[in-house]
């Protein structure tokens, strides 16, 4: 089957994805997995997190600087496909499913990356995991208020409005002091909230009236050994002994 490749735009035979066995809209594996920075080499294999979008640590390091920001992941890129597929798969509420229109890669500054890695190392050192239950690091959804139009077509500049949750998180990470958000409480106490259910996080996404689009964050979260709760616990300030998250 001939296709017009979504990356290089050339006509050619459809490349077959070996995992699904199905033809893709790409002419080759390179175009299917091209690096988000150089647009030449394929993405690195066998890695997770931000590194999975780039061909090497060199290309990854070029996106980590002194100021946070966002860069668009084209619809033709495998990274867009991955996020869109996860969004659809994790939409579990019986309401009309939203459609992913735009996907952006969040550029973290060096201090944010250092803070994340330090927290991950701390959780690993807690020894709450075992050989049969390794450290759990997951991509989770977070919905919050967006005051500006960041993420709308042509808008990649962070705003400085203190009420803009999306820009505030990208600029300086999550603020534990704002955990009550617009709800006025926290189901599991004072914590930073994220969800493996995209439709759940979507209920917290708010945007200005002038936009028909909402914004959500997909964050890599260190959950370690998670504690499972089946009832509200709003007075909680930390997980029970032996656990790293709730």
Image (cartoon, rainbow, N blue to C red):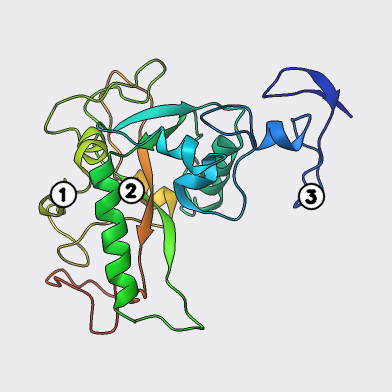
Select label 1 or label 2 by which is in front.
1
To which residue does mark 1 refer?
A: 175
User: In the shown orientation, is residue 215 left or right of residue 67?
Assistant: right
Q: Eyeballing the image, is 157 above or below 140?
A: above
Q: Earlier in the sequence, mark 1 or mark 2?
A: 2
To which residue does mark 3 refer?
A: 18
Q: Earlier in the sequence, mark 3 or mark 2?
A: 3
Q: Which is nearer the eye, 141 or 106? A: 106
**Residue name at image x 57 percent, y 27 percent:** 75
| Residue 41 visible | yes
Q: Residue 104's quadrant in the figure?
A: top left
The reply to whether discs 1 and 2 touch (Cβ–Cβ < 8 Å) is no
Q: Eyeballing the image, is 97 above or below 213?
A: below
User: In the shown orientation, is residue 239 left or right of residue 30?
Assistant: left
Residue 205 percent coordinates (x, y): 31, 39
Q: Residue 152's quadrant in the figure?
A: top left
The secondary element bearing badge 2 is classed as: strand
Q: Which is nearer the eye, 72 or 178? A: 72
Which part of the image, by quadrant, shows the C terminus?
Answer: bottom left
**Residue name at image x 49 percent, y 54 percent:** 92
The reply to whether discs 3 and 2 touch (Cβ–Cβ < 8 Å) is no
To which residue does mark 2 refer?
A: 142
The secondary element bearing badge 1 is classed as: loop
Crowding around mark 2 (Cα neighbors within 10 Å: few <14, some 14 to 19, many 20+) is many
Select label 3 or label 2 by which is in front.
3
Q: Earlier in the sequence, mark 3 or mark 1?
A: 3
**Residue name at image x 47 percent, y 79 percent:** 133
The secondary element bearing badge 3 is classed as: loop
The Cα–Cα distance between marks 1 and 2, rounded to whole angstroms, is 13 Å
Q: Eyeballing the image, is 143 above or below 104?
A: below
């Amino acid at each position: 089957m001939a296709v017009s490749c979504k990356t290089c735009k050339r006509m050619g035979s459809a490349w077959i994805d070996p995992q699904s066995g199905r033809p893709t809209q790409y002419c080759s594996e390179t175009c299917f997995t091209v690096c988000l920075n150089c647009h030449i080499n394929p993405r690195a294999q066998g890695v997770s997190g931000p590194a999975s979008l780039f061909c090497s640590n060199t290309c990854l390091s070029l996106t980590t600087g002194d100021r946070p920001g966002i860069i668009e992941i084209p619809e033709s890129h495998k990274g867009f496909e991955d996020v869109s597929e996860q969004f659809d798969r994790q939409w579990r509420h019986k309401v009309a499913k939203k459609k992913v229109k735009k996907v952006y890669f969040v550029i973290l500054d060096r201090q944010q990356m250092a803070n994340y890695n330090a927290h991950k190392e701390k959780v690993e050192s807690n020894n709450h995991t075992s050989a049969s239950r390794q450290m759990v690091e997951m991509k989770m959804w977070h919905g919050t208020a967006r005051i500006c139009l960041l993420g709308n077509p042509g808008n990649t500049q962070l705003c400085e409005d203190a009420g803009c949750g999306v820009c505030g998180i990208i600029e300086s990470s999550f603020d534990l002091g704002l955990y009550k958000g617009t709800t006025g409480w926290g189901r599991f106490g004072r914590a930073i909230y994220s969800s493996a259910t995209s439709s759940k996080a979507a209920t917290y996404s708010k945007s200005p009236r002038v936009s028909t689009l909402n914004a959500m964050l997909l964050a890599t979260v260190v959950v370690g050994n998670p504690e499972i709760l089946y009832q509200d616990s709003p007075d909680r300030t930390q997980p029970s002994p032996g656990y790293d998250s709730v």
